[in-house]
Image (spheres, grey):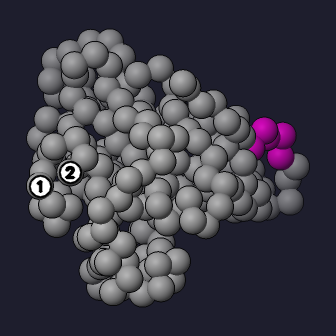
Amino acid sequence: MDFYEPLLPNHYYHIYNHAVGNENLFRKKDNYAYFLQKYTQYIHPVAQTFAYCLMPNHFHFLIKIRSLEEITEHYKALKGKKEHEPVDMNVADFNIQQFSIFFNAYAKAYNTVFDRKGSLFVDKIKRKLVYDEQYLITLIVYIHTNPVYHGFCNEINYWNFSSYHSILSQSSTKIERNTVLTLFGGVAPFLDFHKKEWIFPDDLKLE
């Protein structure tokens, strides 16, 4: 089932998508880095990121759409509008447009590098509203353990293309590290939650 909920300010969403057919979204390490670079360029101004995982043929993000004020300021900057100039913007449409531009920019570069044509991503961006804190915590663990679930690695420590290591690191990051660790109650509980034998709810098993 596809989910096309509006991306509204101050709401959390599970964002995910898959490559068309048997294609891969990422063939080389450079592809993962470029995807995140484009994500930072187009999505970071409109959304905070709490967790992500990129796998060869699909990805997951947990985001919170920024406030209407923050998004409006970004919109004005993009459109070259003055501070007190009125804005005619549908915020949900603008947020979706940012994702569309992001995906198109990545797909265009990918197609050029690998000499391919046509769509790279399945249909529209898929998203699901995150409705409570427990679901939020469960979703973070699900996202980080997804490479193990799909057989891309045996332990989450071995997968380099997720926010798991960034949350545990002291290095600068765009991930909302402190908020995530507070949700879990600190580093030790965060690690313990990720080591548990999880049986995830069916509504999480989207990819």
Q: Which residue has dot 1 on it? A: 154
Asked if 49 appears above or below 13 in the picture, the reply is below
The magenta stretch is 87-91
Could you tell me if the residues under marks 1 and 2 are in contact, i.e. CB atoms within 8 Å? yes
Q: Residue at the location (12% across, 51% down)?
A: 153
Q: Which residue has dot 2 on it? A: 148
**Label 2's element?**
helix
Q: Nearer the viewer, residue 57 or 130?
A: 130
Residue 19 sits inside the magenta stretch: no
Measure how far apart labels 1 and 2 are at the Cα level. Answer: 5 Å
Q: Mark 2: few, some, or many residues within 10 Å (few <14, many ≥20)?
A: some
Q: Nearer the viewer, residue 2 or 46?
A: 2
Q: Mark 1: few, some, or many residues within 10 Å (few <14, many ≥20)?
A: few
**Label 1's element?**
loop
State left or right for residue 60 relative to residue 21. Answer: right
Q: Residue furthest top?
A: 118
* Image quadrant in which the C terminus is located: top left
Amino acid carrying mark 2 in the image? Val
Occupied quadrant, residue 10: bottom right
Which is the main secondary structure of the residues drawn in magenta? loop
Q: Quick check: can you spot residue 53?
A: yes
Q: Residue at the location (35% across, 30% down)?
A: 18
Q: Position of residue 179 (x, y in %)?
A: 52, 78
Q: Quick check: can you spot residue 48?
A: no
State left or right for residue 30 relative to residue 39. Answer: left
Occupied quadrant, residue 113: top left
N-terminal of the two: label 1 or label 2? 2
Q: Residue at the location (47% across, 78% down)?
A: 184
Q: Residue at the location (38% across, 25% down)?
A: 121
